[in-house]
Image (tube, rainbow, N blue to C red):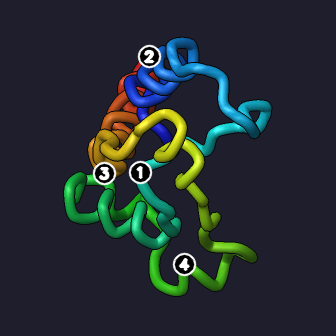
Amino acid sequence: MIDVRDAARAHLLALSTPAVPGRDKRFIISAKSFTWKEFVELYRKERSGLKDRLPRENLEQGFGQTSAPLDIEFAKGVLGMKEYIKWEETALAALDAALVLEKK
């Protein structure tokens, strides 16, 4: 998951960074790896009114792969991106936007 503001910052940094070997590689831009269980726990805690709509126990059992390990070192080294908007803020904003659309 990436916040659109971090994506925009990464694009600007990539456009203004001098050419380096390996520049043809893609940049992984993300604050951290996370699991779907972490998402559900965050939503359950911060949006308790939705708890009946969220998956219950054994969430990890329902998914094959529960996280995607990310290597952000290339982006750190080349672009200097060391700080990101917290994934929790992004996840809650995405949920809130989806709920607004749902009401339409």
Between residues 102 and 43, which one lies in front from this camera angle?
43
Tell me which label, 2 or 1, sits earlier in the chain.
1
Residue occupying the point 70% across, 73% down: 65
Q: Amino acid at mark 3?
A: Glu
Q: Which residue is mark 3?
A: 88
Q: Does dot 1 land on a helix, a strand or a loop? A: loop
User: Which mark's residue is nearer the viewer, 2 or 1?
Assistant: 1
Q: CA distance from mark 3 to mark 1?
A: 10 Å
Question: Mark 1: few, some, or many residues within 10 Å (few <14, many ≥20)?
Answer: some
Q: Position of residue 50 (x, y in %)?
A: 32, 54
Apparent side of residue 63 relative to residue 77 in the rendered image (left or right) = right
Q: Amino acid at mark 2?
A: Lys
Q: Looking at the picture, does residue 80 appear above or below residue 10?
A: below
Q: Which residue is mark 4?
A: 59
Q: Looking at the picture, does residue 5 appear above or below residue 67?
A: above
Q: Position of residue 93 (x, y in %)?
A: 32, 35
Q: CA distance from mark 2 to mark 1?
A: 32 Å
